[in-house]
Amino acid sequence: MGDVLAGFHAVWEFESDSVLIRYERGIRAPKLFQALGERRVPLEAIAGVTLTRGRRGTTVLRAVPRPGADPLMEAAAGQLKEAADPYRLVLPAGRHTLAEYHAAELRALISEDDTPAERFLVAPPEAPLHFKAYDGKASFDGRVVSFRWSWTGASSAKWKAGDQNFPVSALSGVEWRSPEALEGHLRLLRREADAGRPVQPDQDPAAVVFGLGYGPVHESLPFAAAVLAATRAAGPSAGPAASIPAARRDPADIAERIRHLGELHEAGLVTDEEFSMKKAELLAEL
């Protein structure tokens, strides 16, 4: 096709085998769009096309993603607000006819296959990625997911467990609950997780929780999508995960963590044995 269609906050470039979506980085654009930058969506990842009238004479063109084709949409699991839908293009008034033309051209190229894709067809966000949650910092280098707990927000259970490192080969998936909803969190699903009663995210060392002003969608969702894609690529045949040693910490940071551990001990939230053991672990990181 080779045509370009410019709308509010995004430009779609139609190619013979894909649609290249370039998202606006302006201050008025949804923050998720700014974080995504641009995405190439193969035509085989599109199950359909819709065209509707929007507010104030605008026209809304939407490519319907095929189930299982996009790690971002799989991680979002229907939780994105309409304005942050990366497959939705809003066109100014007076461009409905132009949108109809492109919608018809796109429909002629896609197979309108809505069966679940056997693999991800849209490339995930590239690592390294990181974001700040309420109770810690999450980072992903493409191979290992790391959680570093915040002394102001993490529960005593997470402090007892210590900072966490999860190779993607040890994971089976990701559970993302939007920061814009109650009990928002990102939880790593482990292949060999203990059975039984589910642990609340604020007590689970394999999860970080979101709070007001922490873990915004535009940072945590691409993170979840990248981890999800990496776990699928690793697959169940990846074999046992190697232990990933924790990086050495700044002495000042270690001192602050020991101080906070002492506060938990004085408050009765950490036993004498747990305090001694965790203190020794922290000192060993120097």
Image: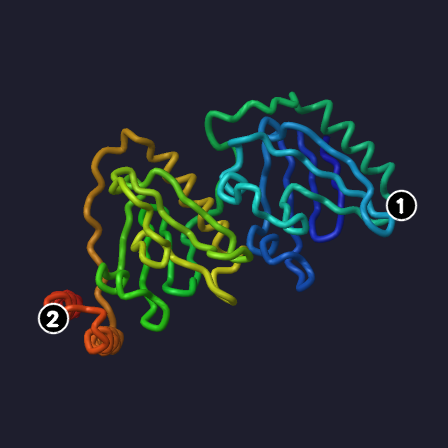
Chain-order first, disc 2 or disc 1 = 1
Q: Position of residue 180 (x, y in %)?
A: 55, 57
Residue at position x 48%, y 32% from top?
120
Depicted 154 relative to depicted 228: above or below: below
Furthest residue to the right?
94
Q: Residues within 10 Å of mark 1 (few under 14, many from 20)?
A: few
Q: Which mark is residue 272?
A: 2
Mark 2 vs mark 1, CA separation in Å: 72 Å
Depicted 193 relative to depicted 151: above or below: above
Q: 120 and 159: which one is in front?
A: 159
Q: 156 and 123: which one is in front?
A: 156
- Residue identified by numbered label 1: 94
Q: Secondary structure at mark 1?
A: loop
Residue at position x 61%, y 52% from top?
33
Choose mark 2 or mark 1, whichever is in front: 2
Left or right of residue 116: residue 6: right
Q: Secondary structure at mark 2?
A: helix
Left or right of residue 87: residue 217: left
Depicted 184 relative to depicted 12: above or below: below
Residue at position x 23%, y 76% from top?
267
Quarter assignment of residue 286 = bottom left
Q: Position of residue 51 (x, y in %)?
A: 78, 36
Left or right of residue 72: residue 169: left
Q: Residues within 10 Å of mark 2 (few under 14, many from 20)?
A: few
**Residue type marked 2:** Asp
Depicted 68 relative to depicted 57: above or below: above
- Split into 4 quadrants, where in the image is the N terminus? top right
Q: Which mark is residue 114?
A: none
**Residue type marked 1:** Gly
